[in-house]
């Protein structure tokens, strides 16, 4: 049973392996509940584009499929979550990824009398993960996400929404994909039991269509946040 924690803010954690559909689902949930989509991976990639110190440090970890050290990641996300647009909550995608990150998030929110209201764990088979990551294409301009088989753009290599160029992430190569899944199993999967023991975890069947998964997640949030 998931407890209802805070009526005035919704901090929702999306937990799942690389390619489970966290980013895809976060976009829809962010629009429905009018709270920001905060994706630690996107923040690192933006920092990298801008050539900041954090971006350059993160690059070496991201390219190998390793996690960026907790100290750097926690400071970065704490700053983002403290911004005024997160006053009413946020959809957290890709954070926390370790027990240390989860505890830091809990402490930072508690300082403001807030807490995570639900953790949606998107369960997807490893076979599906590999297929999803291998076919993912992203718009360089607006960030829209496509899949060559499951959600192809009308014109190959071009974004339907803004006409921008589509690219594949440098960490979506088969070797790095496998490594990211192994790192997830070793360092992030323990969060499943961590949150289950706190009564915060909701399992979501992720091997369904984008729309069906979105529907299940919305229902869970409406019920428990
Ligand atoms: P990050 O960017 O967070 O990547 P990830 O967790 O590996 O997750 P992905 O973005 O690859 O997958 P997703 O679950 O969002 O799937 P998506 O919706 O795109 O992290 C990258 C790196 O940054 C890490 O390796 C690490 O180095 C660093 N990092 C980030 N956060 C960190 C942290 N907290 N601590 C330390 N280091 C950190 O979907 C994938 C594809 O499938 C798409 O093409 C989509 O169209 C398709 N798809 C999605 N859902 C469906 C569906 N239901 N049916 C059919 N197709 C679907």
Image (spheres, rainbow, N blue to C red):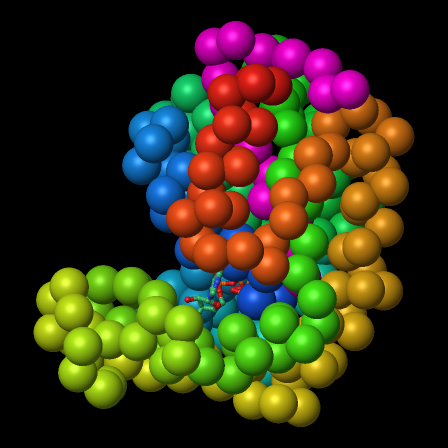
Image coordinates of residue 9 in percent, x first then y, are 49, 17
- Residue 83 to residue 138: above or below: above
**Quadrant of ligand 1 in image:** bottom right
Residue 75 visible? The answer is no
Relative side of 219 to 120, left or right: left
Residue name at image x 59 percent, y 44 percent = 14
Which residue is more in the foreground, 219 or 28? 219
- Residue 12 to residue 126: above or below: above
Res 61 quadrant in image: bottom right
Main SS, magenta residues: loop
Magenta run includes residue 59:
no
Image coordinates of residue 85 in percent, x first then y, are 35, 29
Image coordinates of residue 81 in percent, x first then y, are 49, 35
Which quarter of the image is occupied by the N terminus? top right
- Residue 70 to residue 200: above or below: below
Disc count in the image? 0
Image coordinates of residue 20 in percent, x first then y, are 59, 61
Magenta residues? 1-17
Residue name at image x 62 percent, y 72 percent = 128
Which residue is more in the foreground, 133 or 143? 133
Which quarter of the image is occupied by the C terminus? top right
Relative side of 32 to 169, left or right: left
Which residue is more in the foreground, 122 or 82? 122
Relative side of 32 to 174, left or right: left
Residue name at image x 62 percent, y 79 percent = 130
Residue 20 visible? The answer is yes
Which residue of the protein is positioned furthest toward the left in this rendering? Answer: 163
Residue name at image x 70 percent, y 66 percent = 125
């Amino acid at each position: 049973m998931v407890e209802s924690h805070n009526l005035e803010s919704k901090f929702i954690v999306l937990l799942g392996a690389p390619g489970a559909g966290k980013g895809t689902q976060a976009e829809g949930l962010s629009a429905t509940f009018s709270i920001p989509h905060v994706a630690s991976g996107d923040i690192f990639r933006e920092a990298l584009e801008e050539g900041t110190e954090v971006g350059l440090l993160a690059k070496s970890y991201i390219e190998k499929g390793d996690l960026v050290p907790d100290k750097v990641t926690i400071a970065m996300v704490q700053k983002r979550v403290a911004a005024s647009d997160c006053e009413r909550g946020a959809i957290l995608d890709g954070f926390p990824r370790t027990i240390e990150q989860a505890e830091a998030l809990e402490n930072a929110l508690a300082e403001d009398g807030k807490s995570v209201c639900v953790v949606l764990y998107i369960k997807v088979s490893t076979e599906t993960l590999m297929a999803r990551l291998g076919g993912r294409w992203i718009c360089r301009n607006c960030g829209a996400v496509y899949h060559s088989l499951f959600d192809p753009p009308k014109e190959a290599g071009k974004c339907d929404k803004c006409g921008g160029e589509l690219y594949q992430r440098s960490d979506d190569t088969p070797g790095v994909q496998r490594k990211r899944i192994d790192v997830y199993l070793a360092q992030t999967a323990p969060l499943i039991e961590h949150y289950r023991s706190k009564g915060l975890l909701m399992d979501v069947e992720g091997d369904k269509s984008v729309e069906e998964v979105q529907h299940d997640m919305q229902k869970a949030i409406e019920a428990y946040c």
